Image (spheres, rainbow, N blue to C red):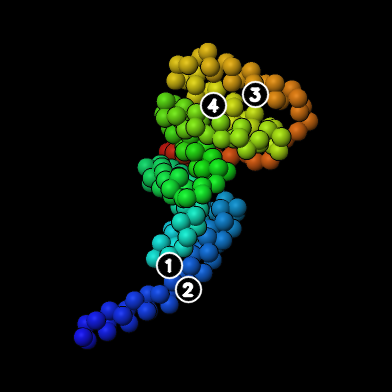
Amino acid sequence: MRMWTMSLVALFLIGCANPINQHTAQNYNELGRQAERAGDYVLAEEYYSRALWNAKIGGLPISGVSMVSYNLGRTKGYLCKHDEAEQLLLDALRMEDELSEPEIGLITMRLLELARLVADQSRYDEAVFYYARAVPLVRELDIESEDPIGFANVLVDYSQVLKSSGNVEKAELIRQESDRIRDSYPLMRPNFVPQSYKQNCNEIEDAATTR
């Protein structure tokens, strides 16, 4: 009887702690965003890690856990922790895929980030797989009308990994589509320019060799 009572108390305490953990997760996620915008990826990684831990134990909705996992995955990628980054991004993608009403835009973000991550590691066949799934979704969202140059840049990246994987014919078709879009909007700039994983790793390697 006493054990049963203690179990109920424990469940009650855990239930009461959930909103606190959820709020803490949101705070740490925002701190992570601020650190990321400042270019301090080490600090961003710490904050996002704390956010993810609190999101999981606090019972944050799956979409919220996916968001934090996605943020932490990107940040670890910027710090050249590619294996950890990939697993976190895959986790984020899986969570979005398993939602009863998945958001195409969020799935597309995770697919494109995975594509860029593996492409920067010269894993071109895997990058093609992610782009091949992401690009039709981007078309479905009609991103070309909202951010034509951003969409053209995605096509350029897709074309490059196709060419590197040996599919030269399709790579050329995708490149031509990208050129057509750029020619149609000669004065426009992309709304978003993704961060390169390779650039940060090169800088880290250069710093290590000069010590």
Q: Amino acid at mark 2?
A: Ile
Q: Is residue 169 above or below residue 43?
A: above
Q: Are marks 1 and 2 in contact (CB under 8 Å)?
A: yes
Give percent across and percent down for residue 102.
51, 47
Q: Are marks 4 and 3 in contact (CB under 8 Å)?
A: no
Residue at the image point whose x is 56% and y is 61% from the top: 30
Query: Pointer 3: what residue?
Result: 178
Mark earlier in primary sequence (1, 4): 1
Measured in 3D between alpha carbons, the distance from the residue under mark 4 to the one under mark 3, in whole angstroms, is 10 Å
Mark earlier in primary sequence (4, 2): 2
Q: Amino acid at mark 3?
A: Ser
Q: Residues within 10 Å of mark 4 (few under 14, many from 20)?
A: many
Q: Residue furthest top?
A: 169
Q: Residue furthest right?
A: 187
Query: Pointer 2: what residue?
Result: 20
Tag on residue 58?
A: 1
Residue at the image point whose x is 69% and y is 37% from the top: 147
Q: Amino acid at mark 1?
A: Gly
Query: Pointer 4: what residue?
Result: 158
Q: Are marks 1 and 3 in contact (CB under 8 Å)?
A: no
Measured in 3D between alpha carbons, the distance from the residue under mark 4 to the one under mark 2, in whole angstroms, is 43 Å
Name the quarter where the C terminus is drawn: top left
Measured in 3D between alpha carbons, the distance from the residue under mark 2 to the one under mark 3, in whole angstroms, is 47 Å
Q: Judge by depth and name the residue closer to the eye, 97 or 183.
A: 97
Residue at the image point whose x is 50% and y is 18% from the top: 163
Q: Judge by depth and name the residue closer to the eye, 136 or 193.
A: 136
Mark earlier in primary sequence (4, 3): 4
Which callout, 1 or 4, points to the residue nearer the camera?
1
Q: Residues within 10 Å of mark 2 (few under 14, many from 20)?
A: few
- Horizontally, residue 40 falls left or right of residue 151, namely left
Q: Residues within 10 Å of mark 1 (few under 14, many from 20)?
A: many
